[in-house]
Amino acid sequence: MQETNEMESGMPENVVYVGKKPAMNYVLAVVTQFNNGARAVTIKARGNTIGRAVDVAEIARNRFVMDTKVQNIGISSEEITNEDGTKSKVSAIQIILSK
Amino acid sequence: MQETNEMESGMPENVVYVGKKPAMNYVLAVVTQFNNGARAVTIKARGNTIGRAVDVAEIARNRFVMDTKVQNIGISSEEITNEDGTKSKVSAIQIILSK
């Protein structure tokens, strides 16, 4: 849905990909981007880390960047290729926080 | 955000709470509600099961009720009381699928 953002702006998007590290690592990444002047930050995750992405968004906006709001949340399905060459579908989420 | 839905309609909301069972159990609950005439079904989850709620929404709309779309997604923080009486914050998600 938001695949064109990078092209539209001509600048790299402010994206934080949420992985297996503690949520606070990603919260700090989000806060840093806002402190560096970003007007919006996109938090992305898929599969097991989707719940953590929601934690990151909630912690960031409730405790650190209280002047931001959830601008948009999108969910989608992505196809990933496993190590053995087979393909699986995995759910993904994208949360945009903006000032 | 959407706490008033039940009062507004005067009818019980069509809500599926996603827990620890396999995603397909909840997918079937969603599909059943649409088949029984619901125009919208709300999928709710919190904490660890948030990722599964996204799976449920994606599987339902991509494989079973293809005439539905994601109407709205909201995230929030809820306070829960632990067994020892202390309180913790937990993230929650609410996904509304509608025809």
Image (cartoon, coloured by chain):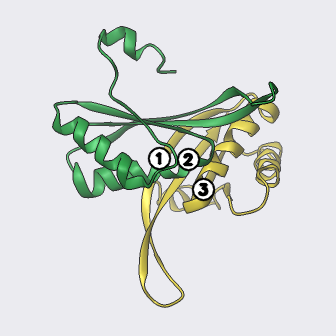
Chain colours: A green, B yellow
The chain ID associated with circle 2 is: A
Res A49 label? 2
Q: Quadrant of the N terminus of chain B?
A: bottom left
Q: CA distance from mark 1 to mark 3?
A: 16 Å
User: Callout 3 environment at 10 Å: few (<14), some (14 to 19), or many (20+)?
Assistant: many
Q: Amino acid at mark 1?
A: Ala
Image coords of residue A42 (percent x, y): 38, 33
**Can you see residue A99?**
no
**Can you see residue A19?**
yes
Q: Amino acid at mark 2?
A: Thr
Most foreground residue, A38 or A24: A24
Q: Are marks 1 and 3 on the same chain?
A: no
User: Circle 3 sits on which residue?
Assistant: B44
Residue B59 horizontal side relative to residue A63, left or right: right
Query: Helix, strand, or loop for circle 3?
Result: strand
User: Circle 1 sits on which residue?
Assistant: A53
Image coords of residue B4 (percent x, y): 47, 59
User: Callout 2 environment at 10 Å: few (<14), some (14 to 19), or many (20+)?
Assistant: many
Most foreground residue, B6 or A21: A21
Q: Quadrant of the C terminus of chain B?
A: top right
Query: Helix, strand, or loop for circle 2?
Result: helix
Most foreground residue, B92 or B6: B92
